[in-house]
Amino acid sequence: MSRTTLDLWVGLFVALGFAALVFLAVKVGSYTDAPGGATYTVEAAFDNIGGLKTRAPVKSAGVVVGRVGGIHFDSQSYRAIVRLDLQRRYEFPVDTSASILTSGLLGEQYIGLDPGADSEILEDGDKLQITQSAVVLEKLIGQFLFNKAAETPTHGASAQ
Amino acid sequence: MNALLRRIGAMTVDGVWRLGFMARFFLALLRCSGQSFRRLPLTIREIYFSGVLSLLIILVSGLFVGLVLGLQGYDILQRFGSSDALGIMVALSLLRELGPVVAGLLFASRAGSAVTAEIGLMKTTEQLQAMDMMAVNPIARVVAPRFWGGVISMPLLAAMFSAMGIFGGWLIGVVAIGVDDGAFWSQMRASVDFRYDIVNGTIKSFVFGVAVSLIAVFEGYDCQPTAEGVSRAITRTVVSSALAILALDFVLTSFMFRGL
């Protein structure tokens, strides 16, 4: 058995193929943190989660610190319970507040964590006490129109 | 009426018959596969014929698909003022769908048909029977290396197709139209996930590789040993490979990408 030019071409082909895969992996894709890796779970109850989805990022100060692990409806309190899988290396005080925010005008929704000042840190299974629901655009517009309608007569009266 | 029913019945029974034979053929192929790795030059020769020789058509098609995606994507995205997201659109559509599917279709028509023709002609000229007479198993010697050559080539070709397509989208978006280079790559990197998008796309192309290679070697092995039979087998390879790729793509997509 000896080397042939055929081997050279096949070697080149395989190398090119793997180069393409490496290009895709390094330049195009990014790694997210391993699911079920070193994370701890806390829960937060929201009145309204808007369009939040599982696997949405959890950010603090703009840095991704975890993922939304699951969402379910609690039929006792009629609120949405959101499970947050936070990375083990990030610690937050127990009075941290969670709010549902939107990246950009039409972007995806994510959970923002604002750390409190307590000296105790969140443990696995804890509940976040302070939460702020998603802003629902329809409600906001409704409120705006309502205010507008309420102020029009007084505006007219002052003009007279 | 009666004749029509009889024909439909015969076609159904024939189809089931072929499917059963194909399954048995696949098992026999897997059982003989050890040899195609122990005698690696056989497989390497087939990687050359189905992989290396498909390289040109794959790279050129990938480039043009990317160029078109760049133009069309920019045209749609700039209406919403989000032309920076061009990179995401090009990368995701290539990695998830177009890369594996179009590379698979090209691979079926470029390499699959050639494999069918080769095996079919070997059968027609009774070379396969001659091997059997010399106590050489034709499935181990002829069929298995061609099958594995295709299976190995296909994911690599699909990856090259996607990479080339992204390069094409970059050429149109960044170089020709003037989308910001940094936004193009950083937005792409932010929303393309390695496990979710790239690994799933590679699994797709691997499955298509198995399907196309199996259909190609089977149609060749099963063809009528006449000139007409070989030509019909080649047609069947291309048609059923295309159908298999598209149907499997739907099944795999519904498993992989459900937007959870």
Image: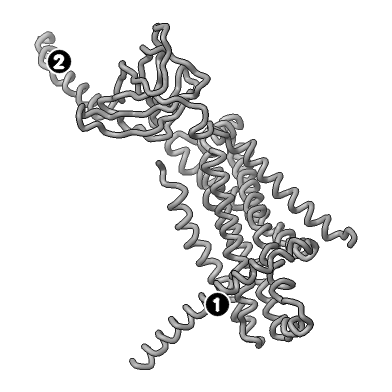
User: Residue at point 42% right, 6% down?
Assistant: A119
User: Residue at point 41% right, 26% down?
Assistant: A41
Say whether residue B163 is left or right of residue A91.
right
Most foreground residue, A5 or B78: A5
- x and y percent of residue B256 in the render? 47, 49
Q: How many marks?
A: 2
Q: Chain of mark 2?
A: A
Q: Amino acid at mark 1?
A: Phe
- x and y percent of residue A62 in the render? 47, 20
Q: Which residue is mark 1?
A: B21
Choose top left, top right, bottom left or bottom right for residue B140. bottom right
- x and y percent of residue B207 in the render? 56, 58
Whether residue A54 is visible here, answered yes or no, is yes
Q: Which residue is mark 2?
A: A151
Q: Is A5 drawn above or below residue A84 in the view shown? A: below
Query: Which mark lies nearer to you, 2 or 1?
Result: 1
Q: Is A75 drawn above or below residue B260 in the view shown? A: above
Classify the position of the N terminus of chain A by image quarter: bottom right
Most foreground residue, A31 or B137: B137
Dot 1 falls on a residue whose secondary structure is helix
Q: Is A4 drawn above or below residue B160 in the view shown? A: below
